[in-house]
């Protein structure tokens, strides 16, 4: 089974921010989970590199647009490498191969009769690369998102006949699961209900972009070009650029994950373009919310932007991944609060999960020759912890399948809490002092160690590094969820059965698997 998912192609106007990191981390968790279940995953990310905003930014800095995009795209690549993002493809829309594919796609759309010439008049936001339907102000209107003045445009453009697809888009957005969450679907329904209007797909006198074949002076509108990057990314590096080849390389995508601000482009314009070109539609578009910081919108002018590089350096991958995926309901807006971030990481990972493994392993080593104790009743799949582990696995798989990272994380925590409670109730440190209790203590410790192993297994899609450290503490091999290297995909599924730990197997010297966060200054 194959599974294709995408982040947005991030606009190469500036370096990556926490919002783009959040989206990419979420997609990484999805991709890892799918791979661990045995699916062949193609995880696409990359940069959208054309448009007037990029041209102006580059010129203001004294660079050519290409040199500017080279630097920004390389910054994204380097950052994703540092975050250990497991993407399979990184597409840049300035790639010459992309231009060839855009030209082929446009030829199909034009042959369908969906390209016409018309005059575009209206207020335009260069930052959004979008005309604003209703700026709500008659004088000096500004973009409601960027809070920057809009520019009046009056020019001859090429238009895509979106209005022709009114009924098809209405039917599509009613399809269960096509747009999620439900709040995003309602936004699109309200937009479509107003009647779809043809939209401009070209600009004139804009040199930084892909020229429109057969239409001198016209450059493709950045959004028409950028969306096609999802298709170009599926081509093998050395194969001819042929649009039909995409259908054998993983299209249609099963999932586009995007910010809610670009929902209209992905849920309305993109499907209509694909219908015009006779190509299959993506199966699902998920629009997540925005991140704020301590209740305030993040912005350079406020000086409160969270730098993903700084977060990584001071806090580490596991801590940031856990907080963003565990605390923010995916699909809603989220607020990054430093104290809550610190508290959750220390409570959940260092204490509840990490300390459970550390103290249980220490007792097992002390009393059972530095090895996994005899399983006894603890290895029975009817053991209470075995039942709790199976319930957790079901909830984790269901949560990740539904993009509910919070539910998956909470299921893992619930298993950890149950195992901690069991250990405290059985109190092996007391029982070991009583005569003839060694077998019972062994069984209890075995069950808790096995529950800890399940915790490590279930954490693999969300926190692959913490998972690997926990498995190492149990003498187990880590999982390869990156899609690179050798591993039987079924290993993860096989690991989700009770009693895998072998009695008598050596246990390494215990070390803390998660360091506590100590942040003495604002991030």
Image (cartoon, helix red, strand yellow):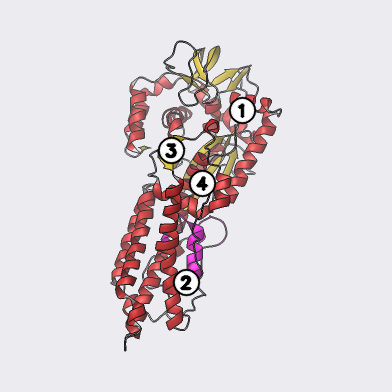
- Which of the two discs, 4 and 3, sits closer to the camera? 4
Q: Is mark 1 on a helix, strand or loop?
A: helix
Residue at the spot x=50%, y=63% of the render? 468
- Which of the two discs, 3 and 2, sits closer to the camera? 2
Mark 3 Cα within 10 Å, few/some/many (few <14, many 20+)? many
- Distance between the alpha carbons at the discs numbered 2 and 1: 51 Å
N-term-proximal mark, 4 vs 2: 4
Q: Mark 3 points at which residue?
A: 282
- Distance between the alpha carbons at the discs numbered 4 and 1: 26 Å
Q: Name the residue under label 2.
A: 474
Q: Mark 4 points at which residue?
A: 43
Residue 512 to residue 92: above or below: below
N-term-proximal mark, 4 vs 1: 4
Q: Name the residue under label 1.
A: 54
Instruction: Mark 3 and mark 2 in contact? Answer it, CB < 8 Å.
Output: no
Residue range highlighted in magenta: 458-486
Whether residue 315 appears in this view of the structure is: yes
- Distance between the alpha carbons at the discs numbered 1 and 3: 28 Å
Does residue 335 appear to the left or right of 16 in the view shown? Answer: left
Mark 1 Cα within 10 Å, few/some/many (few <14, many 20+)? many
Residue 280 inside the magenta-drawn segment: no
Name the outermost residue toward the front.
520
Mark 4 Cα within 10 Å, few/some/many (few <14, many 20+)? many
Q: Position of residue 84 (x, y in %)?
A: 56, 52
């Amino acid at each position: 089974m194959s599974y294709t998912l995408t982040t947005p192609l991030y606009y190469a106007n500036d370096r990556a921010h926490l919002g783009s990191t959040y989206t990419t981390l979420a997609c990484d968790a999805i991709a890892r989970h799918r791979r661990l279940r045995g699916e062949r995953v193609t995880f696409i990310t990359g940069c959208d590199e054309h448009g007037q905003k990029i041209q102006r930014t580059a010129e203001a800095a004294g660079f050519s647009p290409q040199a500017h995009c080279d630097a920004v795209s390389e910054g994204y690549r380097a950052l994703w490498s540092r975050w250990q993002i497991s993407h399979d493809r990184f597409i840049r829309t300035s790639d010459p191969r992309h231009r060839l594919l855009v030209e082929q796609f446009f030829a199909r759309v034009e042959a369908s009769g969906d390209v016409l010439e018309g005059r575009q008049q209206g207020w335009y936001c260069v930052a959004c690369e979008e005309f604003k339907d209703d700026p709500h102000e008659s004088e000096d209107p500004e973009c409601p998102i960027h809070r920057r003045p809009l520019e009046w445009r009056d020019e001859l453009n090429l238009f895509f006949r979106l209005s022709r697809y009114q009924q098809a888009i209405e039917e599509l957005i009613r399809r269960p699961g096509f747009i999620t969450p439900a709040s995003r679907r309602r936004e699109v329904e309200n937009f479509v209900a107003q009647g779809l209007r043809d939209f401009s797909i070209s600009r004139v006198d804009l040199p930084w972009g892909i020229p429109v074949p057969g239409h001198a002076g016209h450059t493709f509108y950045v959004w028409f070009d950028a969306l096609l990057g999802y298709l170009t990314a599926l081509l093998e590096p050395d194969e001819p650029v042929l649009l039909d080849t995409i259908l054998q390389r993983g299209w249609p995508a099963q999932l586009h994950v995007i910010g809610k601000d670009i929902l209209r482009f992905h849920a309305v314009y993109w499907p209509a373009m694909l219908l015009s070109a006779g190509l299959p539609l993506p199966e699902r578009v998920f629009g997540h919310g925005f991140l704020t910081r301590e209740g305030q919108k993040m912005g350079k002018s406020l000086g409160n932007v969270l730098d993903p590089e700084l977060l990584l350096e001071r806090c580490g991958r596991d801590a940031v991944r856990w907080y963003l995926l565990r605390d923010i309901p995916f699909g809603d807006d989220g607020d990054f609060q430093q104290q809550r971030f610190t508290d959750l990481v220390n409570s959940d990972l260092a204490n509840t999960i990490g300390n459970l493994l550390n103290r249980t392993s220490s007792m097992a080593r002390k009393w059972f020759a530095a090895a996994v104790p005899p399983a006894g009743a603890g290895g029975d799949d009817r053991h209470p912890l075995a039942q709790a582990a199976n319930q957790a696995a079901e909830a984790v798989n269901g949560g990740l399948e539904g993009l509910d990272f919070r539910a998956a994380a909470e299921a893992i925590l619930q298993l950890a809490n149950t195992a901690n409670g069991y250990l405290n109730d059985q109190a092996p440190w007391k029982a070991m002092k009583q005569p003839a209790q060694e077998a019972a203590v062994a069984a209890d410790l075995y069950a808790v160690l096995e529950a800890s192993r399940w915790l490590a297994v279930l954490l693999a899609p969300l926190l692959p590094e913490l998972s690997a450290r926990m498995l190492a503490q149990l003498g187990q091999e880590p999982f390869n969820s990156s899609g690179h290297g050798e591993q039987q995909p079924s290993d993860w599924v096989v690991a989700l059965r009770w009693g895998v730990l072998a009695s008598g197997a050596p246990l390494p010297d215990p070390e803390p698997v998660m360091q506590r966060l100590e942040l003495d200054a604002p991030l």
